[in-house]
Amino acid sequence: MREWERLGGADEALWSGRQLSEAQGLEVAELTGVEATFLAASRLARRRSRLRRAGLLLAVPLALLCGWSALALHARQERLQQVEARVAEARRLLAEVRSRQAEAARLGQEAFALFDRQERSEAEQRWTRALQLSAELQPRFGQAAQELETALLLDPQRQELRGQFADLLLERALLAESRHAGQEAEELLQRLSLYDDSGVRRRRWAAPGTLTLAPRPAGASVTLQRFVAGDRRRFRLEPVQRVTGIALADAQAYVAWLAASGRVPRARLCRELEWEQAARGADGREYPHGDELAPEEANFDDTYAREPLAMGPDEVGAHPASQSPFGLQDMAGNVWEWTSSSLAAGEYTTRGGSWYFGTNSARASDREVTEPSFRDVSVGLRVCADLPP
């Protein structure tokens, strides 16, 4: 203690932890003023020493945490820069592709006009160039898609990137379809389903096409026909009387147009109970014409011996033997027909079976609850209408 006084109260002369432990039993009241001051100074120095050691122990992980945070922030910023660079490159490639696409379309139109004027040499040159530009589009689209997909891998939480990539997949699928590359289009659509979270792009793909006619002279009638291959690959013209491959929205849009245009006033989808009554009458028969169905009496899977190239929808009325009690044709087989459910509001069914299915599906009592988005070449429509008031 005298040494502490001699050194002017220096910390190095204070008691250590062991000495302080031994002094635990001392009564402060029994100490002189200098002794009490020395003991208090030793204890204070001891607490400071402990705090310094604790601070050092905390400083190490804090320093590591700060260093890791700085590295993580730097990595995040670097990743964001890479993402933006990929997106910018994709946009550049897409701008180039669309410019070439527009140029190819312009050259194609000019080539057709030159062909019409018998300027064959110039027309061939422009047509060749249009084909060259068109051939370059798909690889460029692929490069742009790769850039966007890489950006998504770097930052998978960016919803706007998912949307941009989905838009690009749809655009590529449409281009593949225009080149009659069905397999390529199907593969792109499968990938699209992974990124089209809202389903809006799939709906755009499945939306029905619109045919607008401007006949000359005005008021001229138009007949829609198709070529059908016959024996020895000889083709014949047949009227198109049955439209297939429609989803519920197509059927609803068509009957709404019939009603609005006045072609079939009050046209609507058939309700399934009225459809069934029209198909079988009131005597409980299985099929429109009786309790058995032979292959020649309707168009179902056995009609053409399940031969894939022979199967398909027939012309309306091609099987009169299965006419219903009310004189309706094709209530069994040919194509499924959309109806509104009589059992649950907002539910829709398909009735009647089709050329691809068997006799059980062609029974008048058979009902298939069908998703509104379902679209297949075996599905069509029969129109019903309310009587005038």
Image (cartoon, helix red, strand yellow):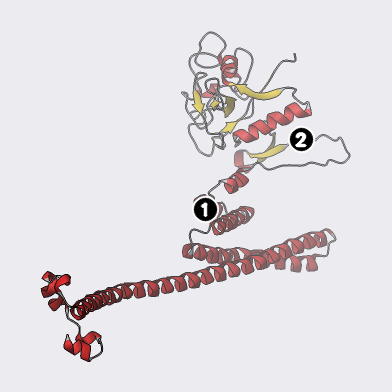
Picture quarter with the C terminus: top right
Relative to the observer, which residue lies in front, 212 or 66? 66
Residue drawn at point x = 64 percent, y = 15 percent:
327
The image quadrant where one finds the N terminus is bottom left
Indicate which label's residue lies in the foreground, 2 or 1: 1
Determine crowd level at label 2: few under 14, some 14-19, many 20+ residues with C-alpha closer than 10 A.
Answer: few
The secondary element bearing badge 2 is classed as: loop
Q: Which residue is at a point 57% across and 11% down the rendered structure image?
A: 281
| Residue 383: quadrant of the picture | top right
In front of the other: 177 or 113: 177
Left or right of residue 244: residue 193: left
What is the x, y in percent for residue 80?
A: 52, 69
Q: What residue does disc 1 label?
A: 195
Q: What element carries label 1?
A: helix
- Of residue 371 and residue 162, the one placed in the foreground of this image is 162
Measured from the top left, where is residue 23 in percent x and y? 12, 74
Is residue 354 in view from this perspective? yes
Vertical order, 35 against 152 (above or below): below
- Residue 309 position within the rendered picture, expressed as x and y whole percent measured from the top left: 53, 39
Amino acid carrying label 2: it is: Thr
Q: Is residue 310 left or right of residue 243?
A: left
Which residue has dot 2 on it?
A: 223
